[in-house]
Image (cartoon, grey):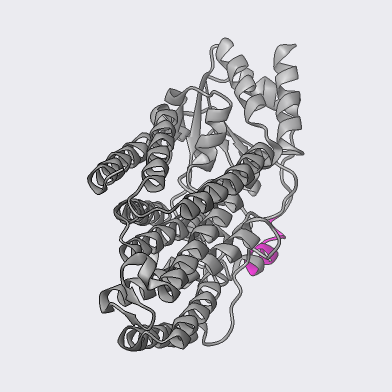
Amino acid sequence: MGATVSTLAYLAASVLFILALRGLSHPETSRQGNVFGMVGMAIAIVATLFRPGMSGGGVALVLLGLAAGGAGGYVIAQRIQMTALPQLVAAFHSLVGMAAVFVAAAALYAPESFGIGTRGHVKTASLVEMSLGLAIGAVTFSGSVIAFLKLDGRMSGAPILFRNQHLLNLGLGILLLLLVIGFVGSGSEALFWLIALLSFALGFLLIIPIGGADMPVVVSMLNSYSGWAAAGIGFTVGNLLLIITGALVGASGAILSYIMCKGMNRSIVNVLLGGFGTEGGAAAAARADRGPVKVGSPEDAAFIMKNASKVIIVPGYGMAVAQAQQVVREMADLLKKEGVEVKYAIHPVAGRMPGHMNVLLAEANVPYDEVFELEEINPEFAEADVAYVIGANDVTNPAAKTDPSSPIYGMPILDVEKAKTVFFVKRSMASGYAGVDNELFYRPNTMMLFGDAKKVTQEIVQALQR
C-alpha cells in the first residue's frame, strides 16, 4: 500500500471516528456510532499493517498485540458487570497513558525507526512532542489507577488531603516544566526518566484529593488526557491518524468535562485541584439526630403509584448495583397500562461516569422519549404525584440548595422533593458517595423503602399485578 493510499485510508478512518462521536451523542444513534467507530478502527489497523516500511517482523508483532488485546477485551466484555463500567473505563484510560510512555521511550531509544534522528541526536521538535506525550501519558496512567481504585472501592472515595498539598503540586508542576525544557535542550535519557517519574507522582497527587462527588468529572478529564497523550505521541512518530484521533478524544473529553462541571456548578479548575467532599463525614454525623423517617412498604408504593396520574422515576447508582433496570421498566409498563404517565429523570452525574444511567436504561429497552435530562424534567416534579428514587442520593439532596457548608452546595439537583410523594429506595440510611447526609430522607412527603432495589421493585410489580 503506497503512502498516498495509506494517508487516504487514515483520512477515511478519521471521518468515521468523527461520525462515531456524533452518533454517540444521542441514545437513538449510539449503536450506529459504535459501528462507525469499529469500522474506522478496522480500516486504521489494515492501513497500518500495509503502510510503507512495515517489515514482516513488525506486522507479526502488531498481529500478536491485536490477538492478545482482542482476546483480553473479549473476556473482559463478557464478564464485566454494568456496575463496574466506570472503573473499567478508568482502567482503560490508564492503559492508553502507559502506551504513550512506552512509545515515547521507544522513540527515544530507537529514533531511526521513526525518522526523527539518531540516538543522542533527536530533532528538537520531536523532543518537545515526545516529552509532552510522555508527561501527559504518565499523569494519565497514575491518575487513572487512583480513579480505578476509588471507583472499585479498593480505596476510600473520600478526599485524601495533607498540609500544603496544592503548593506541593504547584512546585512539582514547575519542576516538571523545567525538566521538560532541560530534556528538549539536551535529549538526556536521565531527564527523560525523571520526567516520567515526576509525572507518575503528579498524576497520583492530583487525583487522591478529589472526592466522590466529582469522580464522574475526573473520569471524563482522564479520557481527555489520554487523547492528548496519544496526539502528542502521534506527532513524535509521524502518524496522522494518531494525531487526529488523539485530538478528537482530547477535545471531546474536555468539552464533556466542562459541560459536567457546569451541570454541577463546579469550576473545572477547582475540580482538578481537588478537595471537595472533605466535610462529608462531619456533615453526616452532625445531622444524624434529625429525627425519625417514614418507612413504607412495596404494597404502599404500589397502591399510591397505581392511583397516581404522573410518576417520575429517578435512577441512581443503587439501581446499577442491584441491576434493577429491567424490573424498573417492567414496573413502568404496568403503571402505563393503568393509565399513569411515566417519565425518567436523569442527572448529568448520576452514577459513576457520564451517561451511566442512560446506558442502563437503554439496556432495559426503556423508550428514549420517556428519558429526560435535569433541565427538561425539573419543572415537572411539582406536577408529579410520585417520585420513585432508586439510590440517587447526592443528586437529589436539597442540601445542595440550602446548606452553604455542604460540599455539594451549588450543584444543580433533581427537584424530587417537590413531588407530592417521594419513595426513596435504599439499603440503609448511609450517606451517598459524596459522604453527605440527605435532607430528603426527613421530609414529610418522603417514604423510605429499605432493601435491595431489585427486590423492592419486584415486590411492587407483584403488588401491581394483583
Residue drawn at x 60%, y 37% as measured from the top left: 389
In front: 250, or 214?
250
Residue 13, percent from left and from top: 33, 41
Q: How many numbered dots are placed on residues in this image? A: 0
In the rendered structure, the answer to whether residue 4 lies left or right of residue 236 reads left
In the rendered structure, the answer to whether residue 405 lies left or right of residue 53 reads right
Q: Which residues are magenta?
A: 282-290
Residue drawn at x 51%, y 57% as measured from the top left: 93
In front: 187, or 34?
187
Q: Quadrant of residue 365?
A: top right
In this picture, is 37 found above or below 133?
A: above
In the rendered image, which quarter contains the N terminus?
top left
Residue 41, percent from left and from top: 41, 41
Decide whether residue 455 is among the magenta residues: no
In this picture, is 134 found above or below 434?
A: below
In front: 210, or 245?
245
Residue drawn at x 54%, y 27% as measured from the top left: 385
In front: 277, or 274?
274
In the rendered image, which quarter contains the C terminus?
top right
In this picture, is 145 found above or below 63?
A: below
Residue 359 visible here = yes
In this picture, is 164 found above or below 375?
A: below
Residue 463, percent from left and from top: 74, 18
Residue 203, percent from left and from top: 51, 72
Q: Quadrant of residue 281?
A: bottom right
Q: Residue furthest front?
A: 56
Residue 352 visible here = no
